Image (cartoon, coloured by chain):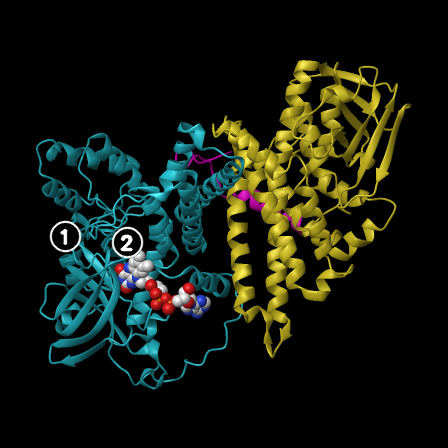
């Protein structure tokens, strides 16, 4: 899949034709079913996610199974393709459990390395989007803490992203990783009021719940780590898509909005800020593609590539969204204008799967630049 | 004849090495033979140092030559010729000009400089006032240029001068190749912030340039200069570097080797800059992949912006990291170096020299304007110089 270039060590950072086709399919679906007014309406409804949109995206386009090999009923593609989907979902701040279920939970299950049994069965259901699974690890974590839940499946966890939409919770315990049906006895999923309106959070309380043990503690820990690494890596693509939307809309708005008898976008103080953002978006794209490609090829560079992408892209997305609100003026502060959705998503994303500071600490470790 | 592929280039390079063993061949002779074999810049036309091959295959040749310890043409010493004069001569020169200038330029026998900026025309380069007046087969040039890097070692210069003051400024400029050894060319060192004189003032008094050394049509020098300037920006920001290959390298090494210098504040700043330098490296790599795939993007001007800011921030951090040593400076003696050296000497030098990175080759402010208008399509600011003859502009 990845064409090695003359650069040698540097992965292919471009998009292939197949990836561009996939992007076009996702984008046209989202244009139809998920424009900004629809997203805002959805955030005010009781059901955070539109099941028809999810079905079209997951099964219709086959996006949910991109990471899943064909023998488990998936598309057998990879992280580069999934990253393109995530990028588009970020561009439209789509409320859908893609990153949590189709990337993190799926990647975790794949990393268990099981060929049959409950893992394979669950993977097949995730690949078609018939079921949604989420990893019951706080959304801000880069590392699981299996001691939170005892082997008796007692404990409280949160905030868990997309738990409200999940059919299955993947719960790391001291014993290993359990699959717990969200509707089972002893499981309570309590919605929280989230900063990001488009990605619901909940606490999960287990009181002597029953579940299926998927793997022993050691295997589970490594698999959950891998799931979170993939989540952090592809989150960079979400941040890229989000930042790109913010820049494009800001350019469009400031070209059209007139004050002082000229377009406000002709004032140099604004032009320079947008040009600076452009440079950040271009750079974020290189970082995000690098993370996606290293994940796809299983390169030993993956942990560094992911940490670099997260340390960089979080800041770019927040900056782009903040500039978007500011350069839209008063309209940018309104509920009707979508800018606030992007700001809320960007800020929440800057905490998801580890803050930039946390990822810089990883960079320090991997590059042997230790703290004093 | 079809252009060679990677295997073909490898074979041709080995043939060159066999016919001119680097161990027994003089440096200049070897470089001339390499040029004549078409292995200088493989994407240039056959007969002009190239073989019409894809630009992306140059590393195949370079790797073979490096492995054989062949001499190189020291691109740093001939940066202006290689990065700016050559692409402009290739695009606009006559056949005779191309044959005369490209070979000695590439071999490094002839160094070039760029006579563009003037005391009154820097960012607003098209406002320049150096005059070129036609006299028979010659042009007679009078004026003053400034900040001219390497003028003291240059044999040739690319020069823009005003040939018609009665039309708006962009339309009355022509582009010439100036012989720096001609009577009337006077180069005076201009000492700079680092203490040395890497650039110069150049006074042009009654310099006669034959019309055969004009590049492009009379009055279209601004268009020709655009080729030069675009190449300048790509060549300043677009170099390919390994991880920690730029300014971040020495700082990271110092950090690793000298734990006594570490503080928490410096650690956070170092890591932020390390990440940014790594991302800039990847962005540059992506830009080159786009070029190879034939989808040239506007990322080039962005790279120069990123390069300037990073160099300045990293070298600034480095001076602080060094503490007491950062208070010292290697040498303030006024020298006239042959090389334009961004990374040389000590941290203090790097800090001071990098201040030029956001000025030379177009200031960062001007580049941001270019990105905003040409890449993002933002409206231009209202202008009051568009339809005014150059001679009627206020100066
Ligand atoms: C180390 C070094 C080497 C150089 N080598 C060469 C050389 O070899 N040959 C050569 O011809 N020239 C050379 N230059 C000159 C260089 O190209 C000019 O200095 C540069 O283009 C800026 O012009 P200026 O110095 O006149 O600054 P000015 O144009 O006077 O700018 C002053 C300030 O105003 C800002 N400014 C100007 N116009 C605008 C605008 N429209 N919008 C916003 N801000 C603006 C600038 O960014 C700057 O901050 C060199 C310069 C340096 C520092």
| Near-viewer residue (B344 or B157) | B344
Q: Secondary structure at mark 1?
A: helix
Circle 2 residue = B83
- The correct choice, above or below, for B269 with respect to A144 in the image is below
Q: Secondary structure at mark 2?
A: helix
Q: Quadrant of residue B215?
A: bottom left
Residue B250 percent location from the top left of the image: 37, 36
Q: Same chain, marks 1 and 2?
A: yes
Instruction: Say if the magenta span includes residue A16.
Output: yes
Q: Is residue A9 left or right of residue A55?
A: left
Q: Chain of mark 2?
A: B
Q: Is residue A282 left or right of residue B152?
A: right
| Near-viewer residue (A119 or A247) | A247
- The correct choice, above or below, for B320 with respect to B89 in the image is above
Q: What span is in magenta?
A: A1-27
What color is chain A drawn in?
A: yellow
Q: Is residue A318 left or right of residue B390?
A: right
Circle 1 residue = B104
Instruction: Say if the magenta span includes residue B121.
Output: no
| Near-viewer residue (A1 or A46) | A46
Residue B200 percent location from the top left of the image: 22, 61
- The correct choice, above or below, for B333 with respect to A8 in the image is below
Alpha-carbon neighbours of circle 1 within 10 Å: few (<14), some, or many (≥20)? Answer: some
Res. A192 visible in picture: yes
What color is chain B drawn in?
A: cyan
């Amino acid at each position: 899949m990845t064409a090695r270039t003359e650069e040698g060590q540097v992965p292919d950072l471009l998009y292939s034709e197949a990836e561009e086709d996939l992007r076009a399919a996702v984008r046209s679906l989202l244009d139809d079913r998920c424009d900004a007014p629809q997203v805002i309406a959805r955030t005010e409804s009781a059901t955070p996610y539109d099941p028809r949109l999810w079905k079209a995206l997951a099964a219709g386009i086959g996006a949910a199974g991109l990471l899943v090999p064909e023998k488990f009923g998936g598309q057998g593609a990879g992280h580069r393709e999934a990253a393109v989907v995530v990028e588009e979902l970020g561009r439209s701040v789509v409320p859908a459990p893609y990153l949590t279920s189709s990337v993190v939970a799926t990647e975790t299950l794949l990393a268990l390395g099981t060929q049959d049994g409950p893992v394979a069965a669950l993977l097949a259901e995730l690949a078609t989007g018939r079921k949604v699974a989420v990893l019951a690890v706080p959304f801000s974590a880069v590392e699981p803490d299996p001691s939170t839940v005892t082997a008796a499946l007692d404990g409280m966890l949160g905030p868990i992203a997309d738990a409200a939409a999940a059919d299955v919770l993947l719960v790391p315990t001291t014993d290993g990783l359990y699959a717990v049906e969200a509707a089972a006895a002893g499981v309570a999923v309590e919605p929280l009021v989230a900063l990001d309106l488009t990605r619901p959070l909940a606490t999960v309380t287990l009181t002597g719940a029953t579940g299926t043990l998927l793997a022993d503690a050691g295997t589970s820990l490594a698999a959950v780590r891998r799931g979170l690494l993939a989540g952090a890596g592809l989150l960079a693509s979400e941040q890229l898509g989000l930042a790109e939307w913010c820049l494009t809309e800001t350019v469009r708005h400031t070209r059209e909005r007139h004050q002082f008898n000229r377009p406000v976008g002709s004032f140099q103080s604004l032009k320079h800020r947008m040009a600076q953002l452009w440079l950040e978006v271009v750079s974020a794209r290189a970082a995000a593609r690098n993370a996606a490609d290293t994940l796809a090829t299983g390169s030993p560079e993956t942990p560094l590539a992911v940490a670099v992408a997260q340390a960089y892209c979080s800041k770019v997305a927040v900056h782009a969204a903040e500039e978007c609100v500011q350069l839209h003026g008063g309209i940018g502060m309104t509920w009707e204008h979508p800018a606030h959705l992007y700001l809320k998503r960007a800020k929440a994303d800057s905490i998801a799967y580890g803050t930039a500071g946390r990822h810089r600490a990883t960079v320090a470790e991997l590059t042997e630049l230790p703290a004093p | 004849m079809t252009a060679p592929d990677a295997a073909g280039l490898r074979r041709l390079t080995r043939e060159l090495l066999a016919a001119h063993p680097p161990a027994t061949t003089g440096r200049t002779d070897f470089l001339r033979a390499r040029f004549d074999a078409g292995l200088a810049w493989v994407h240039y036309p056959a007969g002009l140092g190239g073989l019409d091959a894809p630009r992306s295959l140059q590393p195949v040749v370079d790797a073979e030559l490096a492995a054989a310890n062949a001499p190189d043409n020291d691109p740093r010493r001939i940066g202006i010729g290689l990065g700016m004069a050559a692409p402009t001569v290739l695009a606009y020169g006559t056949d005779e000009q191309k044959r005369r200038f490209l070979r000695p330029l590439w071999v490094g026998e002839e160094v070039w400089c760029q006579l563009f900026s003037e005391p009154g025309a820097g960012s607003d380069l098209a406002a320049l006032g150096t005059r070129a007046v036609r006299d028979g087969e010659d042009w007679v040039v009078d004026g003053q240029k400034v900040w001219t890097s390497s003028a003291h070692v240059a044999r040739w210069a690319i020069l823009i001068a005003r040939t018609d003051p009665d039309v708006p400024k962009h339309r009355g400029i022509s582009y010439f190749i100036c012989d720096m050894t001609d009577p009337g060319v006077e180069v005076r060192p201009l000492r700079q912030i680092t203490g040395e004189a890497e650039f110069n003032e150049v006074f042009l008094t009654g310099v006669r340039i034959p019309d055969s050394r004009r590049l492009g049509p009379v009055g279209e020098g601004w268009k020709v200069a655009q080729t030069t300037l675009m190449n300048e920006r790509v060549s300043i920001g677009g170099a390919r570097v390994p991880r920690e290959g730029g300014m971040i390298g020495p700082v990271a090494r110092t950090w690793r080797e000298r734990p006594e210098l570490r503080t928490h504040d410096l650690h956070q700043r170092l890591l932020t800059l390390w990440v940014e330098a790594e991302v800039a490296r990847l962005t540059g790599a992506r830009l080159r992949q786009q070029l190879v795939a034939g989808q040239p993007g506007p990322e080039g001007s962005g790279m120069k912006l990123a390069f300037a800011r990073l160099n300045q921030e990293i070298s600034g951090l480095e001076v602080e990291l060094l503490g007491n040593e950062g208070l010292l400076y290697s040498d303030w003696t006024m020298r006239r170096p042959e090389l334009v050296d961004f990374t040389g000497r000590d941290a203090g030098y790097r800090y001071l020299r990098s201040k030029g990175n956001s000025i030379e080759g177009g200031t960062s402010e001007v580049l941001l304007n270019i990105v905003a208008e040409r890449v993002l399509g933002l409206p231009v600011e209202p202008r009051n110089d568009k339809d005014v003859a150059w001679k009627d502009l206020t100066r």
